[in-house]
Image (cartoon, rainbow, N blue to C red):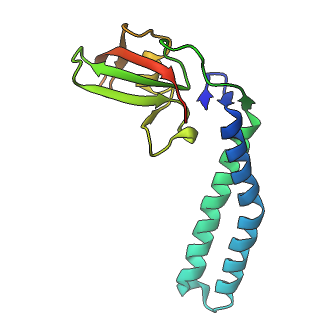
Amino acid sequence: MTQTSENVTWLTQEAYNQLKAELEYLSGPARTEIAAKIAAAREEGDLRENGGYHAAKEEQGKQELRVRQLTQLLENAKVGEAPAAEGVVAPGMVVTIAFDGDEDDTLTFLLASREYASEDIETYSPQSPLGTGVNGKKVGEDAQYELPNGKFASVKILEAKPYQG
């Protein structure tokens, strides 16, 4: 999954299907389950001191936020394939960089929307300072990006290959 500056999110068919299934579950069965939890907790009496009720309401709020996020994401989604060309940094690519020209100090990450983040690989948004700095660069080129303190850091692109999931 990748994002562009026009608020279009490019998804692989697999990612789209996973997000759509999550939305359908959260909008249907999960809403019914949380409503039942809230009703059961409400029957316990005094709501001011009812921990189960407050926990269920908090869970409901988080669930509804996720429903809104998924709805917006899928409304702006376009289904397509991950970038096919190796060697040029683009959203959907796994990128390896070296900091300040030190080939031993490297970082490998997926350049993609946070929605596609996984525990397997660190993910940087194309809109992040690092993502903006490396996007469009070729293997072997140097890139600069702005640090939070206003200074600039340099990195060298060592590898860029399509994310395989």
Q: Residue at x 42, y 30 (%)?
A: 109
Which residue is at 21% across, 23% downward? 104
At 63% across and 62% down in the image, what residue appears?
61
Q: Nearer the viewer, residue 20 or 163?
A: 163
Residue at x 30% of width, y 17% of height: 152
On the picture, is 82 further left or further right than 30? left
Residue 5 at what x, y percent from top left? Answer: 61, 22
Spot occupied by residue 6 in the image (x, y as percentages of width and height): 67, 22
Report x, y in % for residue 110: 47, 30
Task: Between residue 32 and residue 81, name the one nearer to us.
Answer: 81
Residue 38 vertical placement versus 99 (above, below): below
Tell me where residue 102 appears, x and y as whole percent: 21, 18
Image: 102 above or below 122: above
Question: Based on the displayed image, in which of its 4 quarters is residue 47 positioned?
Answer: bottom right
Q: Tell me how many marks there are.
A: 0
The residue sitting at the front extreme is 164
